[in-house]
Amino acid sequence: MAPEIFHSFLSGGTGYSFEVDWWSLGIMAYELLRGWRPYDIHSNNPVESLVQLFSTVSVQYSSAWSKEMVALLRKLLTVNPEHRFSCLAHIQASAQLSAVVWSDVCEKRVEPAFVPNKGRLHCDPTFELEEMILESRPLHKKKKRLAKNKSRDNSKDSSQSENDYLQECLEAIQQDFVIFNREKLKKSQEQPSESVSASETADEAEAEAEPLHMCSSVCSSGSS
């Protein structure tokens, strides 16, 4: 979050405006380039210490970055929102992005440098398994999306990648996975026992009835 958000939390003040979004853009760009954020901030840090942090700690920029990139990041990560880049015109005028054809960007005519394969996993499959276990209807939306993507993609790779294999395993587990229900199991166990006890009662009744039939036959023969 931008410094003015913490200031407004402490003193109220006039609040903050859209400049906080450009600060977030600078944080994201810095993290993508370096692998970590410019400020070491945690959720348990008091707000007072964070306000002091922004005024005492300066952002460290890598020497491997170009001067134009560092200048752009400095403008995005300026603590004072009045001196921060806060509109698209400022970004377009920066030396780092001078070669960008912004009309093509606005018309979505620029080809991205990387296009992920829609039919493959791009994350740790462990999270998918956790979702399958915890959710009542796991991966039902993703399964439809993958099926739709497969119908669009007519060309298939000759060899399956590891991610494709993992996805097939996840779908197989989803089909065979049975949600454990203790109450249903208890009822299913009680029903056979009830039927068995009923049959045993009937057998005992027949066994008790046989001596009576024998006695009645003997008595009838003796009287005759």
Image: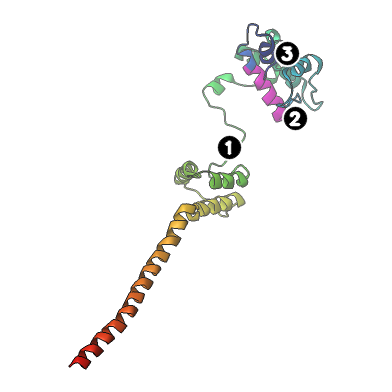
Determine whether, in the image, residue 202 is placed left or right of residue 151: left
The alpha-carbon separation of the residues under discs 1 and 2 comes to 22 Å
Q: How far apart are marks 3 and 1 (CA)?
A: 35 Å
- Amino acid type, callout 2: Arg
Residue 35, position as x, y percentages in the image: 73, 32
**Which circle, 3 or 1, is nearer the viewer?**
3
Write down the residue under mark 2.
34
Residue 181 drawn above or below residue 71: below
Mark nearer the viewer, 3 or 2: 3
Question: Does residue 107 appear to the left or right of 209 in the view shown?
Answer: right
Residue range highlighted in magenta: 21-34
Q: Nearer the viewer, mark 1 or mark 2?
A: 2
Whole-angstrom CA distance, mark 3 to mark 2, is 20 Å
Q: Is residue 155 magenta?
A: no
| Residue 31 appears in view | yes
Task: Give the residue pinned by disc 1.
Answer: 115
Query: Residue 25 in magenta?
Result: yes
